[in-house]
Amino acid sequence: MDLMEQFPLIQLVNGEGKQLEENPFITIANAKRFYEQMLFSRMFDRKAVNLQRQGRIGTYAPFEGQEGAQIGSALALEDGDWMFPTYRDHAATAAFGHSLVNIFLYWKGCIEGCVPPEGKHIFPPSVPIASQILHATGTAWAEKKKGSDRVSLVYFGDGATSEGDFHEGLNFASVFQLPVVFFNQNNGYAISVPIERQMHSKTIAQKSLAYDIPGVRVDGNDVFAVYSETLKAVERARNGEGPTLIEAVTWRYGAHTTTDEPSKYRDQRESEQRRQSEDPISRVEKYLRAENSWDGHWEEELKKKAEERLQQAVTEMEKTKKSDEGLMFDHVFGTDVWPVQEQKERFFHKESER
Amino acid sequence: MSIAVNMKKLTMVQAITEALKVVLEEDESVLVLGEDVGRNGGVFRATDGLFEMFGDERVIDTPLAESGLIGTSIGLAMNGFKPIVEIQFLGFIYPGFNQLITHATRIRTRTQSRYTVPMTIRVPYGAGVRAPEIHSDSTEALFAHIPGLKVVVPSTPHDAKGLLISSIRDPDPVLFLEPMKMYRTGKGDVPNGSYTIPLGKGYRRRSGHDISLFAWGAMVNVAEEAAEKAAAKGMECDVIDLRSLYPLDKELIAESVQKTGRAVIVHEAPSSGGVGSEVISVINDTSFLYMKSPIKKVTGYDAPVPLFTLEDDYLPDANKVLRAIEEAVRF
């Protein structure tokens, strides 16, 4: 059987906002909930890019275009589950309950930004590619040993599937049948390298075959399909049926980070075309319009509320000029270790004067 | 250290098994993971019998993937367990190095102690047993250089058990290096039951006033042998087994050289960038004006550990150490 047939791109609502099949999750209420979260994420992302341009935060990795994949998957989790993001997954972490102030602080170069709110299992953004896949597998392993029904969901990109840690994570999860959802966002590019140079395989989903675990390929810009498929994977994990690999096919409209210029390695007209034809947010707007449920005032209210929320977070973030110097030393070990103590002492008594 | 009345004569590898048994019994959250650690009892038999005693939920044969093993153990450690990972040889740990240096040792700092990694990685290391290629590495300095990681090296069965129990109970990642050459080199008195030896503390093996010898792992015996030979020539050595390479026992190092005014550091790892250089730095910081002669190092060479026909040429031995002692004393 052809692999493209075996792993078809699952789509519930197409780029025109047309519902393609019956699904219990395609409701006006869900559409509005998804729309609100995605709109907020996009505004967050643009705010962060602007803050970087103004020198108010450091380098930032924008996710515009990937809101459907991130919101659809994050909303499928429950409190107590574990989320392992990369540095491009702030739509997901914010939707799962991370503090906006902390997300901004992270990009402002403050370690406090790595700390999730009390009771929320959100790991700091993983920088070395694919390495977090193993942590998600390990925490899921711990949950299984405890006999709980908590699951881990880990984000990673298309480039990560070339790394050994991706394969080792899938293999461990498969061997020990662990409650983990491997959520791949295939946005077509690892910085400048296109997916064709990353792999000869036709899909990422098919890599599940090697580990004999379920694999699905979903339109990552269709938030309904992402939500529905992630929820199925999460429920399988909760019920002790092991891991799933999800490939969410999406697109990053902009640069890899604010230090990069995408027109150097690809024709940005493609990003513009995709924005017209398959954008995750306007797709839901089109759906709501088709259902006669679109309300311009409602959208204006959402935008106003979002702007206020973002402004508040930025104001709060800017109260921290820099991290407290003690934070460099205080959490290296849980016990006093003399070289660290001695260096801290020296720093505060002799070396901290500017 | 608690007092234990009953002693047994054990090899180092048996003492390690005893330590694992103690912690597996006392703490349900302790897990042993690795390649061949289960039914086979480990390639050196360090986990012998544990699979039968504690079952495959706690003594776990994993797929053959060092990064996977260390990376998933980080997840287990962050979520309530205390994994003890066995890597078969130090030369095989490098695929897991990224997990160790970018995650295991940074998670406490990155999350400001919200998440921690109480994980012990046990690894046989060092040359001198005619092992195949890549099985004899002594790259402890790579690890002693990583912030957030403690590095521990026992040289006797007694210390192996006490230090391993301390390492497993420590709230942070510990690399526990087991000198392969010492695994079955004689038996020593090992107390029954539970006892600990604090991390970061060295031990004086022999007292002398003329020169300090600092060593760890299999090199401690080499230093002692050299001290015997030096004594025959009228030079008394203070022999210090450092036992922890991070953090070093600054007080003991300083106390010893302030008494002797001379030092030789012996390690089988390559000379440049080795832990010996850090010992010199501690002496420099604490005891500069006490020194009567330049500090000597007797080490492996800045060359890959050779295949075993040249192993004895590569390794420090008592004669090489004796020459360094004589040079320092006669300076």
Image (tube, coloured by chain):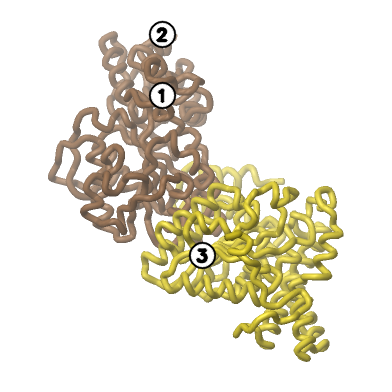
Chain colours: A yellow, B brown
Q: What residue type is labelled 3?
A: Pro
The answer for how far apart the CA atoms under marks 3 and 1 are is 50 Å
Disc nearest the viewer among 2 and 1:
1
Between B216 and A299, the residue placed more toward the observer is A299
- Which chain's residue wears label 1? B
Residue A248: % across, % down: 64, 65
Residue topped by disc 1:
B268
Q: In this view, does A223 lie above or below B156?
A: below
Q: Is residue A125 among the parts visible in the rendering?
A: no
Q: In this view, does A317 lie to the left or right of B3?
A: right
Q: For residue A7, which quarter of the picture?
A: bottom right
Give the residue displayed 78% in from the left and 87% down from the top. Answer: A290
Give coordinates of residue B157: x percent, y percent: 24, 36
Provide residue B280's location: percent of width, then percent of height. Answer: 48, 26
Instruction: Tell which subunit mark 3 falls on.
Output: A
* Amino acid type at mark 1: Glu
The residue under label 2 is which amino acid type?
Arg
**Residue at mark 3 to residue at mark 2: CA–CA distance:** 73 Å
In the foreground, A3 or A92: A3
From this viewpoint, which residue is outermost toward the right? A269
Q: Do labels 3 and 2 share a chain?
A: no
* Mark in front: 3 vs 1: 3
**Marks 2 and 1, how far apart at CA:** 25 Å
Residue tagged by mark 3?
Answer: A214
Give the residue at mark 2. B330
Q: Is residue A331 visible?
A: yes
Quadrant placement of the C terminus of chain B: top left
Q: Disc 3 vs disc 2: Cβ atoms closer than 8 Å?
A: no
Give the crowd class for mark 3: few <14, some 14-19, many >=20 residues within 10 Å: some
Foreground disc of the pair 3, 2: 3
